[in-house]
Image (cartoon, rainbow, N blue to C red):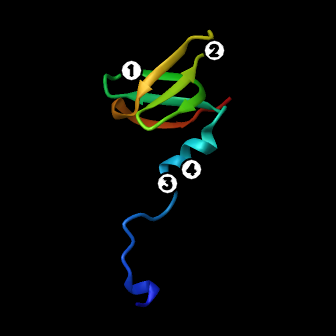
Amino acid sequence: MDEKAKVSQVWGKRSAEFYAELENQPVHVAASNGKSFKGTLIGVDVYDILIRQETGLELLLPKGNIIYIHRASA
């Protein structure tokens, strides 16, 4: 079968790549409860992300409650 004829279910950057690029970078996270958080992304697993805020407080945020995450300006 021709490669163009195959329909890919996944294309572009995958979420694991996205999170890997943000590792140890400052991020801004918006949660579904209306709160937003800034910190350094220090961990990611299947269900959660972990950020460390400037105060040293580490927050475990469930991925299911995240509306968006992006690199924050330093």
Q: Nearer the viewer, residue 40 or 49?
A: 49
Please tell me whether mark 3 sits on a helix, a strand or a loop. loop
Q: Earlier in the sequence, mark 3 or mark 2?
A: 3
The amino acid type found where label 3 is placed reads Arg
Mark toward the viewer: 4 or 1: 4
Q: Residues within 10 Å of mark 4 (few under 14, many from 20)?
A: few
The amino acid type found where label 2 is placed reads Glu
Q: Earlier in the sequence, mark 2 or mark 1?
A: 1
Q: Nearer the viewer, residue 39 or 60?
A: 60
Instruction: Read off the residue under disc 1.
Output: 35
Quadrant that contains the N terminus: bottom left
| Snapshot quadrant of residue 21 | top right
Residue closest to the far bottom: 1
Real-space Cα separation, disc 4 to disc 1, in angstroms: 25 Å
Real-space Cα separation, disc 3 to disc 2, in angstroms: 28 Å
Quadrant that contains the C terminus: top right
Q: Please tell me which residue is depicted at 57% across the width and 30% down the height of the picture.
A: 43
The amino acid type found where label 4 is placed reads Glu
Instruction: Read off the residue under disc 2.
Output: 54
Query: Relative to 44, does residue 3 appear above or below in the rendering?
Result: below
Pointer 4 with pointer 1, Cβ within 8 A: no
Q: Residues within 10 Å of mark 2 (few under 14, many from 20)?
A: few
For residue 60, the mark is: none
For residue 14, the mark is: 3
For residue 17, the mark is: 4
Q: Earlier in the sequence, mark 2 or mark 4?
A: 4
